[in-house]
Image (cartoon, grey):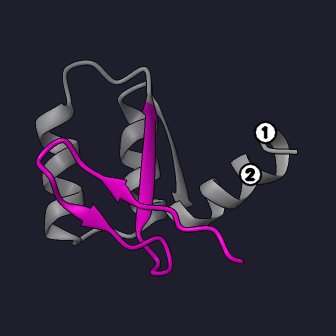
């Protein structure tokens, strides 16, 4: 039997964890939320370019695939 994992946003959108959905994690970013959302939404910057921009603001950024986060969680917390 395989596990079924369903992820749902606050707006009720479902996400398929078998795709390459991405999770961005930002640290130490306070006043740049709109800029960050626009960077992701327009998809005009590579991750490296985004990382350099965020670091110039004094923040940090990490990028993970949703399926990898779930797999890592399962391997470390569900044993």
Quickly name the residue at label 1.
77
Along the viewing direction, whichever of 6 and 35 lies nearer the viewer: 6
**Distance from the alpha carbon under mark 1 to that under mark 2:** 5 Å
Which mark is drawn over residue 11?
none
| Quarter containing the C terminus | top right
Residue pointed to by mark 2:
74
The reply to whether callout 1 and callout 2 are in contact (CB within 8 Å) is: yes
Foreground pick, 79 / 43: 79
Give the camera-side residue of 77 and 47. Answer: 77
Residue at figure coordinates x 19%, y 21% from the top left: 31
Task: Give x and y (percent) for residue 59.
Answer: 44, 28
**Furthest residue to the right?**
79
Left or right: where 53 falls relative to 19: left
Asked whether 3 falls inside the magenta stretch, the response is: yes
- Residue 1: quarter of image: bottom right
Q: How many marks?
A: 2
Secondary structure beneath disc 2? helix
**Main secondary structure type of the part rendered in magenta:** loop
Q: Position of residue 68 (x, y in %)?
A: 64, 63
Task: Residue at 57%, 66% (x, y): give it.
Answer: 67
Q: Residue at x 19, y 33 (%)?
A: 33
Quick check: is 7 in the magenta stretch? yes
The magenta stretch is: 1-26
Q: Is residue 58 above or below residue 17?
A: above
């Amino acid at each position: 039997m395989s596990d079924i994992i369903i992820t749902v946003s606050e707006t009720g959108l479902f996400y398929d964890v078998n795709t390459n959905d991405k999770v961005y994690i930002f640290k130490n970013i306070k006043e740049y939320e709109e800029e960050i959302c626009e960077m992701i939404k327009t998809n005009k910057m590579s991750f490296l370019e985004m990382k350099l921009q965020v670091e110039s603001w004094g923040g940090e950024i990490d990028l993970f695939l949703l399926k990898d986060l779930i797999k890592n969680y399962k391997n470390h917390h569900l044993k």
